[in-house]
Image: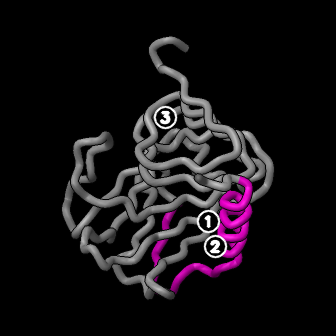
Amino acid sequence: YIDFASVFKRLVKASDFYASQRTSEGVVENYSNINDRYIDVSKAKPTDNVVYVNIDARHLNVHRPINIYGLSSDKNAPTVVINLVGADSLRIVRSKINLYYDCKDTPLEDGEDHDVPHRLLWNFGSQEQRIHFVEEGFMGSVLAPNATVSVHEGLDGNIVANVVNIFDADTN
């Protein structure tokens, strides 16, 4: 059986550990052009096969996509952990996330039909909070072990939270 209390304690520690890491060397970020916001991890130097990116959580509250370039489908590729700084003030996630794998010019389609492994984790931190995902096309797994997460539109990834609410967009 699964001892959920023990597992969640480990996940809180993991979330806190990730949040304590600095952005990996070689990561390039740009949010200045509202229509061309991106994170490029293609030249990032991983630590223990993990690339860390620390971004201001407010970037997810903008109704414009964020493109993530430089992801690899190789089975030994690093995991990318995006730590959201100031996530405790974030209530609504509006940004679509486009993932670009293997230097391709088109993003991965969201949904269950792709064959590329997810190696992207959004770390919302271990604080108690409420987070609403309202834009279709959010890609990557979510770690928010003490949060209440509500998904009103498609989220392509796993969710670890204290409470998870999934709403059918057609019935809201």
**Which quadrant holds residue 96?**
top left
- Depth check, front residue: 105 or 140: 140
Q: Is residue 105 left or right of residue 46?
A: left
Q: Which residue is mark 1?
A: 83
The residue positioned 50% from the left and 87% from the top of the image is 47
Residue 84 covered by magenta stretch? no
Q: Nearer the viewer, mark 2 or mark 3?
A: 2
Dot 1 lies on which element?
Answer: strand
Separation of disc 1 and disc 2 at Cα? 7 Å
Q: Residue furthest front?
A: 1
Q: Residue furthest top?
A: 171
Q: Is residue 157 above or below residue 48?
A: above
Q: Percent position (x, y) of residue 106? A: 21, 54
Q: Which residue is mark 3?
A: 135
Q: Which residue is mark 2?
A: 18
Separation of disc 2 and disc 3 at Cα? 25 Å
Q: Percent position (x, y) of residue 85? A: 70, 63
Q: Amino acid at mark 3?
A: Glu
Determine contact: label 1, label 2, CB under 8 Å: yes
Q: Amino acid at mark 1?
A: Asn
Determine contact: label 2, label 3, CB under 8 Å: no
10 Å neighbourhood of mark 2: few (<14), some, or many (≥20)? some
Q: Is tag 1's residue or tag 2's residue first in the polypeptide sequence? A: 2
Q: Percent position (x, y) of residue 94? A: 55, 39
Residue 21 covered by magenta stretch? yes
Dot 2 lies on which element?
Answer: helix
The residue positioned 50% from the left and 61% from the top of the image is 121
Q: Is tag 2's residue or tag 3's residue first in the polypeptide sequence? A: 2
What is the magenta range? 5-31
Determine contact: label 3, label 1, CB under 8 Å: no
Q: Amino acid at mark 2?
A: Tyr
